[in-house]
Image (cartoon, coloured by chain):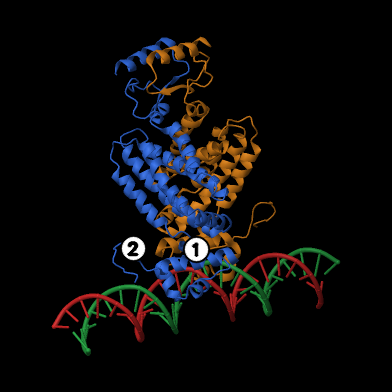
Chain colours: A orange, B blue, C red, D green
DNA sequence: GCTCATGCTGCACTGAGTGTCATGGCATCC
DNA sequence: GGATGCCATGACACTCAGTGCAGCATGAGC
């Protein structure tokens, strides 16, 4: 009855069987106390088959990150120059959150595992690093020509990943009860406030002649005036007036 | 003749002998092509002694990070509330750079190794992660009470680490020829411009009553006034005057 | 029925990492 | 000076992750 007609479905269930067996044992007796032989014994398959589906014991804990990374890469490659770069990478980060939110129970279990097993933490870091590199590469392309383009790309990518993880972890700590999307949106919104569009102005420590009276196409848009603290007051006022006159 | 009188010196040179032997073999025939038995054979010691000095084969590639991490932790713990938080973590990051710059040739060799051996890259990521956590913990303490304090701490820590690594890597790519300090200073300066002190104001879209006329203890210090773009001009001026009056 | 391909299994092997015990130097104490 | 205890090292055996290889099943195509 299980017609294997549809193309992308009906893959061999051995992968899922191995993941299920592995997590049962990991939760029961711990990751390091579980050998690969234990896993394949419980799954009822040969030991060699395990390493056919997972290149290492750690990989069975993160069975879907490879797919998600491919999705993110495709998402970034698809977006042309019509999107604002920082917003684009924030949206890309939300793809990762979506993957976590699809299986809250699984994600929470995995979070507890990675929190206490150093080897898994290291593995997770290498996964996160690949996400961050994907974001940074995209931003480097978008920032090409800007002064310190690669530096800004790296910094923004790191900030986005940190914010995403901050929101994600607070959701995971709540055992997947709260609203994952809201937590991450809030965190990413913070980063967008700091870097989105105004980052250019904030990085240049001189009076910024942006027309303040212009119509507010983005209500959250801000104008930044920066000066050295010892600037004479009359100069601040004069530069302000000059900026206002440009309107 | 080698009087072992001084307390902190004359430690067993076996550690250094193992590092030297390991690196000779790593650069000669590659990291994965070198077994621990090869290393101890070249160093002329027993295999068990290797794991007495290094908990894993990877650790021999990063023999001084543990010490550097301890230094950073101490540095952050020593600094009271009199230092500006973002500047403080930037200075802490410079401790890592100093460690790299002490042995340029060694650092460049290690860089080439970690660049092409995935296992070493993963290990390095876990080391960097511990630095980042140290910075973030410090910042969380300094940002306590601020809205989104932990989020800001995580984001700033990630940005500082990313900037530091950006500068460090560009120096390593130049085979340690250029000025490492200048590269990292430039990168960290970028982050300080974005987050330093003004981060609070930039993140909160309201007038920030920082006393502008105060003496400039730091000539690079900046004051940021942020407001929504559709704020009436008279309100901007009034808030400015009010801020100035606080001096 | 034969064959070829594919996927699974068992087996043997390498190499990292650990526990345990014996040895041998070295300082101390009597 | 000799006995004692400590500590660093070394030697051996063991577990377990990961890999290469060879055999064996099943299922499709001719």
Q: Left or right: A145 with respect to C20?
A: right
Do callouts 1 and 2 point to residues on the same chain?
no
The N terminus of chain A: image quadrant:
bottom right
Q: Are marks 1 and 2 in contact (CB under 8 Å)?
A: no
Letter of the chain that mark 2 sits on in the rendering: B
Vertical side of B130 occupied by D24: above or below: below
Indicate left or right for B183 with B242 as reference: right
The span from disc 1 to disc 2 (Cα, nearest Å) is 53 Å
Picture coordinates of residue B245, whole percent (x, y): 30, 15
Mark 2, secondary structure of its residue = loop
Q: Nearer the viewer, residue C25 or A127?
A: C25
Please tell me how crowded label 1 is: few (under 14), some (14-19), or many (20+) other residues with Cα within 10 Å: some
**What residue is rendered at 43% in x and 49% in y?**
B98
Residue ID for mark 1? A21
Residue underneath mark 2: B9
Label 1 sits on a secondary structure element that is: helix
Q: In this view of the protein, which residue sits in the foreground, C16 or A181?
A: C16
> Numbered disc 1: what chain?
A
Q: Is residue A73 above or below residue B5?
A: above
- Mark 1 vs mark 2: in front: 2
Q: Quadrant of residue A25?
A: bottom left
- Where residue D4 appears, x then y in whole percent? 21, 84
Near-viewer residue (B119 or B43): B43
Residue A115 image label: none
């Amino acid at each position: 009855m299980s017609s294997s007609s549809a193309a992308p479905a009906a893959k061999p269930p051995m992968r899922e069987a191995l993941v299920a067996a592995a997590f049962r044992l990991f939760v029961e007796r711990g990751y390091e106390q579980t050998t690969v032989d234990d896993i394949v014994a419980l799954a009822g398959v040969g030991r060699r088959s395990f390493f056919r589906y997972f290149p290492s014991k750690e990989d069975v804990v993160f069975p879907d990150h490879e797919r998600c990374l491919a999705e993110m890469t495709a998402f970034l490659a698809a977006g042309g120059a019509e999107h604002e770069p920082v917003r684009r990478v924030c949206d890309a980060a939300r793809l990762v959150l979506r993957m976590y939110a699809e299986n809250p129970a699984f994600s929470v279990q995995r979070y507890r595992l990675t929190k206490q097993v150093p080897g898994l933490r290291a593995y997770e870091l290498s996964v996160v690093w690949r996400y961050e590199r994907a974001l940074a590469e995209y931003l480097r392309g978008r920032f090409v020509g800007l002064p310190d383009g690669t530096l800004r790309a790296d910094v923004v990518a790191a900030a986005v990943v940190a914010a995403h993880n901050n929101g994600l972890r607070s959701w995971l700590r709540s055992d997947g009860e709260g609203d994952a999307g809201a937590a991450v949106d809030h965190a990413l919104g913070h980063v967008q406030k700091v870097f989105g569009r105004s980052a250019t102005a904030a990085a240049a420590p001189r009076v910024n002649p942006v027309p303040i009276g212009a119509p507010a196409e983005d209500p959250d848009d801000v104008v930044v005036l920066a000066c050295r603290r010892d600037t004479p007051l009359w100069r601040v006022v004069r530069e302000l007036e000059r900026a206002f006159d440009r309107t």
